Image (spheres, coloured by chain):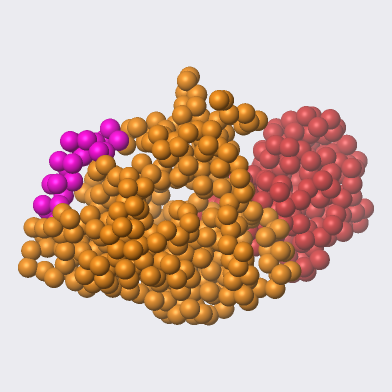
Chain colours: A orange, B red
Amino acid sequence: MAIESKYKICTRCIYDERVSSISFDENGVCNYCHQVDMLVKEYGTGQQKGMDTLNGIVTEIKKAGKHKKYDCVVGVSGGTDSSYMVYWALKNGLRPLAVHYDNTWNTAIATENIRKVLQHWNVDLYTHVIDNKESDDIFKSFFEAGVAEIEAATDLALAETMYRAAAEYKVKYVLEGHSFVTEGISPLGKNYFDGKYIQAIHKKYGKKKMNSYPLMSFYQFMKWTVFYKIRKIRPYWYMQYSKEDAMAFLKKECGWAYYGGHHLENRMTAFFHGIYAPQKFNSDYRNNTLSALVRNGKMSREDAWIEYNTPPKIEPELLGYFKKRLGLSDTQYDDKMREKPNFWWQFPTYKKRFELLRPAFFILAKANLVPMSFYLKYCFPVKNK
Amino acid sequence: MITIVNYGMGNLGSVLNMFKRIGVEAIISNSIRDIEKAEKLLLPGVGAFDAAMELINKSGLLPVLNHKATEEKIPVLGICLGMQLLTNGSTEGVLNGLQWIDADTKKFEFANNDMKVPHMGWNFIQPQNTSPLLEELNNESKFYFVHSYYVQCKNENDVLATTLYGDRFHAIINHQNIFGAQFHPEKSHKYGMQLLTNFSKI
């Protein structure tokens, strides 16, 4: 059965011409499919090459962590990938410290999942909880600014919290549960964030002082990578990883519960994916996961396309919860959603500095001290913004 | 007809080409006689504030320009540096501006240099007032900017549109017959053409 659509769609996944910076080869296969193939080849994902590299990394982690209470930190959200990462670390003889950044918008399921997983395997937890009013003030300032990166504060705070935990316990390795096989790589250029950006938006539109938010400033970033030399590892880039198997395993093993979709364990994340991105920015990120399922033969292209074109499921209380916590009236909310979006490049960021320091970041990326994706994405000027 | 003032600075050719493209008659001139006869003036400009003011002062065009702008009150459009010349003066230099609009020109300053200066590339405008110059233009309209200095009007009513770059600055200004646009309409494709068409109809 062929997919019928007015858009040109990749013949292998379901990315269509609306995806930014997309191009198609002579067979109609998109550049993002090729990117995944290239990464599989480079990292030897799921093959002997990948396993050998990963085993080498595990040995290094153990060596570096000898005589220490923990040898790695693992960020946990209550979602599938990070929960399974905890198990994977234990299975490989590592002694992980779980780290959680609590932006106070967690669903009860997520909090319960974190507890169940860590209790079951007896893993310690390091949490940073932001003052809930401050958290709401930061989210509100992004909503007021009308920019897409409403989730940036959480993503960067988790990174900072993991570094802080690692530094406190003298751990040199941070494990991240990202998998390009099951999630794909997000397109370049459209979205961007760093510590300066978060600070600038909050300073301009926020009402409270930034106190309990763990801001990753440029100085902090350099401190963690250059001085502390904390390395970030993404084991799923090397190994065979199936989200479905991981989920089934977690359910059976420790009573972990599914929360209804990728990224929906947190209410702000759910708002971003289900309402904010599709309605204000006309972007629906479900095609990342769906395309990955198709590439991996877990779902047919046709079924994925049908699901992608069905409106996302949204908890009926979600929007009300969002408005209530941010103190927005229905009219204020509607006006803001109708307003034309603004963009990251209209605000102060470290981007210019990252570009100036490109040669230094190349060296850091080669040494695994900053991710190669950071170097490729953040240290070059953006075209076609 | 539109007279593009050639005081010795500015990308005159591309402005003239753009007028040709939209079917509006225009000439480039540095003669007092031509400017005396002008129905509309376009003041281009690329470069430094003082250098431009010095050239205008030396060219001997200043009295006639002042006469046309402030007494005859024919429509005048300053673009990029040409817009900044309409103001009282600029922190870039020490010379007075033409002082046709009560505004100042200031340098972009961002703490820790965390935004690129010059502001270069495409950006949106946000209309603040209605004006024949903004006909068919709205907050989806994109223009091409290259500037390190920006204009700040003293009177909010003189602001036709703002642009967000770190903070909002005044991108299109107007006082009576005097108009200014910070971007390069001649490099802004269809939106630039629209703005120049609008100016030709004023």
Q: Nearer the viewer, residue B57 or B92?
A: B92
Decide if residue A113 is on the left or right side of residue A276.
left
Could you say which quadrant of the image residue A36 lies in?
Answer: top left
**Is residue B43 found inside the magenta-colored segment of the image?**
no
Is there any visible trace of residue B117 in the rendered image?
no
View extreme (top): residue? A26
Decide if residue A330 is on the left or right side of residue A92.
right
View extreme (front): residue? A252
Q: In which quadrant is the N terminus of chain A drawn? A: top right
Q: Nearer the viewer, residue A39 or B180?
A: A39
Position of residue A132 measured from the top left corner of the image (x, y, whole percent)? 48, 78
Q: Nearer the viewer, residue B65 or A63?
A: A63
Position of residue A175 measured from the top left corner of the image (x, y, whole percent)? 26, 57
Q: Nearer the viewer, residue A336 or B176?
A: A336
Q: Is residue A76 above or below residue A168?
A: above
Position of residue A249 measured from the top left corner of the image (x, y, whole percent)? 30, 54
Q: How many marks?
A: 0
Decide if residue A301 is on the left or right side of residue B38.
left
**Is residue A59 found inside the magenta-colored segment of the image?**
yes
Q: Looking at the magenta stretch, what is its main secondary structure? A: helix
Name the residue at 47% across, 68% down. Answer: A107
Name the residue at 8% across, 63% down. Answer: A66
Is there any visible trace of residue B143 in the rendered image?
yes
Position of residue A149 measured from the top left corner of the image (x, y, whole percent)? 52, 58
Name the residue at 27% across, 56% down. Answer: A85
Q: Is residue B113 above or below residue A306?
A: below
Magenta-colored span = A40-61
